[in-house]
Image (tube, coloured by chain):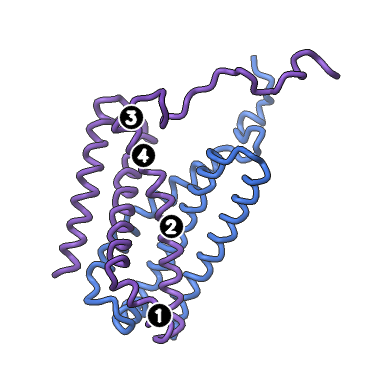
Chain colours: A blue, B purple
Amino acid sequence: MSYRSPLGRARGLGSAKEGTHHFWVQRVTAVALIPLVLWFVYSLAQLPSGSYEVVRWWVHAPSVAVTLVLFIACALYHSVLGVQVVIEDYIAADGTKIVALLLSKFVHAIAAVAGIFAVLKIALA
Amino acid sequence: MSTPASSKPANAARPLSPFMIGPYYKPQMTSMLSITHRLTGLGLSFGALLLVVWLSCLASGPECYALIAPHLAAWYGKLLIFAFTWSLLYHFCNGIRHLMWDLGKGLDMPTAEKTGYAVIFASLGLTAGVFVLTLV
């Protein structure tokens, strides 16, 4: 017999009130990153050089800017979920764990906003 | 409130599954690939931060870009870019292996070992392909 209510079982969220959301978004961003990573690596390898003018010209193209924003967003979202799992697995002390998690979330948020801002600044210049 | 059970530390002498790296388990190809997936993932998180620094310098102007461009062209910069490229392609290939497991496919040992070798060779082959692409 189960002590769970039928509604609780249907929601499937458990005591953490989160269910499989973390697991699922990790997979959704992973699938999105399959084409994005291939595009990113191929595009950078194809650039004639890494000079200021060449890279500005590359980022400036609307299709590149849009795809680069998607890549930055998906990569950093995937990264923040992965780093969270590593912190939760290896840091046992609650205080250190919470500080490390906060630090990781803040750094990832700053990086995502700064990266997307940089691309838009070049694209809209 | 005090019972004999609660006077003992909560985790005293409780059997624990040993960590896969240590004296209890023989290193296996599959477990090494698993820890490499984590390590490359952490490395790529750091690489994503460097990518943002690079793009921010690119956006702020030629003076800022001139500060980091020599480091990218130096031997250690090239080595770092090579390491990030392989890490990304390894994490990419092994990530697809993980997604396949999520679908319930390839979980038996012979298949897991075969796909493990496939990931090693595919990541190295793709890295070599990217290197060739930068030359042409």
| Chain of the residue displaying label 2 | A
Q: How busy is the neighbourhood of tag 2: few (under 14 within 10 Å), some, or many (20 plus)?
A: many
- Which numbered marker is on residue B98? 4
| Chain of the residue displaying label 4 | B
Have a look at marks 1 and 4 and say if they share a chain: yes
Q: Assess whether mark 3 and mark 4 are in contact (beta carbons under 8 angstroms).
A: no
Q: Which residue is mark 2?
A: A75
Which residue is more in the foreground, B7 or B102? B7
Q: Which residue is mark 1?
A: B67
Q: How busy is the neighbourhood of tag 4: few (under 14 within 10 Å), some, or many (20 plus)?
A: some
Q: Nearer the viewer, mark 4 or mark 3?
A: 3
| SS label for mark 3 | loop
How far apart marks 4 and 3 lie (CA) works out to 20 Å
- Number of marks in the image? 4
Q: Position of residue A11 (x, y in %)?
A: 62, 35
Which of the 4 image quarters holds residue B97?
A: top left
Residue B103, placed above or below residue A112: above
User: What is the quadrant of the C terminus of chain B in the image?
Assistant: bottom left
Looking at the rendered structure, the kind of residue marked 4 is His
| SS label for mark 4 | helix
Residue B103 visible, this angle: yes
Q: Which residue is mark 3?
A: B27
Q: Is residue A86 left or right of residue B51?
A: right
Q: Nearer the viewer, mark 3 or mark 2?
A: 3
How far apart marks 3 and 1 lie (CA) works out to 44 Å
Sooner in the amino-acid sequence: mark 4 or mark 3: 3
| SS label for mark 2 | helix
Q: Position of residue A99 (x, y in %)?
A: 64, 51
